[in-house]
Amino acid sequence: MITIGRVCTKLAGRDAGKTCVVVETYDKGLVLIDGETRRRTCNIRHLFPRQETLDIKKGATHEDVLMLLAKAGLITIRESKKKDTPKPIKEQATKPDKPKAKQKAPKKKAK
């Protein structure tokens, strides 16, 4: 049921509700997932398999998985728009030079 290329929805964890693809299968019900989620090992009990499958190779890269998910219309890739304006530089206030105070010699105790 859970094979390489199977599209799933993550059910548990901080990536819950996000779409992922099985990239590799391991022993004891563990799989390597990637997609909208972080690329990591996941228990198959935390996945909801969908009907869709993607034709990917074992161990496909993150970029390949995202590209195939976008072509299939399962996710939309959002590009972050960074501003080209430089950050303002904060000028430090300079203190005026003070003349150095003369050091006094310690007083001697009277006997």
Image: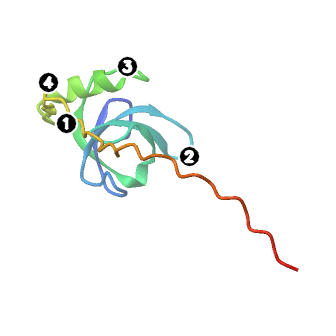
Q: Of tags 3 and 4, which is closer to the observer?
A: 4
66 in relation to 106, above or below: above
Real-space CA distance between mark 4 and mark 2, rounded to the nearest whole angstrom:
32 Å
Name the one closer to the observer, 106 or 76.
106
Give me the disc on residue 71.
Answer: 4
Q: Could you tell me which secondary element the residue under label 2 belongs to? A: loop
Give me the disc on residue 28.
Answer: 2
Could you tell which of marks 3 and 1 lies nearer the N-terminus?
3
- Residue at the (36%, 40%) spot, across then down: 38
- Residue at the (44%, 40%) spot, across then down: 40
Q: Type of residue at label 1?
A: Pro
Real-space CA distance between mark 3 and mark 1, rounded to the nearest whole angstrom:
47 Å
The quadrant where residue 46 appears: bottom left
Quarter of the picture containing the C terminus is: bottom right
Could you tell which of marks 4 and 1 lies nearer the N-terminus?
4
Real-space CA distance between mark 1 and mark 2, rounded to the nearest whole angstrom:
54 Å
For label 1, the residue is 88
Q: Type of residue at label 2?
A: Lys
Q: Of tags 4 and 1, which is closer to the observer?
A: 1
Q: Of tags 3 and 2, which is closer to the observer?
A: 3
Percent position of residue 35, x then y = 29, 35
The quadrant where residue 5 appears: top left
Q: Type of residue at label 4?
A: Lys
For label 3, the residue is 57
Could you tell which of marks 3 and 4 lies nearer the N-terminus?
3
Percent position of residue 34, x then y = 35, 35
- Residue at the (34%, 44%) spot, across then down: 96
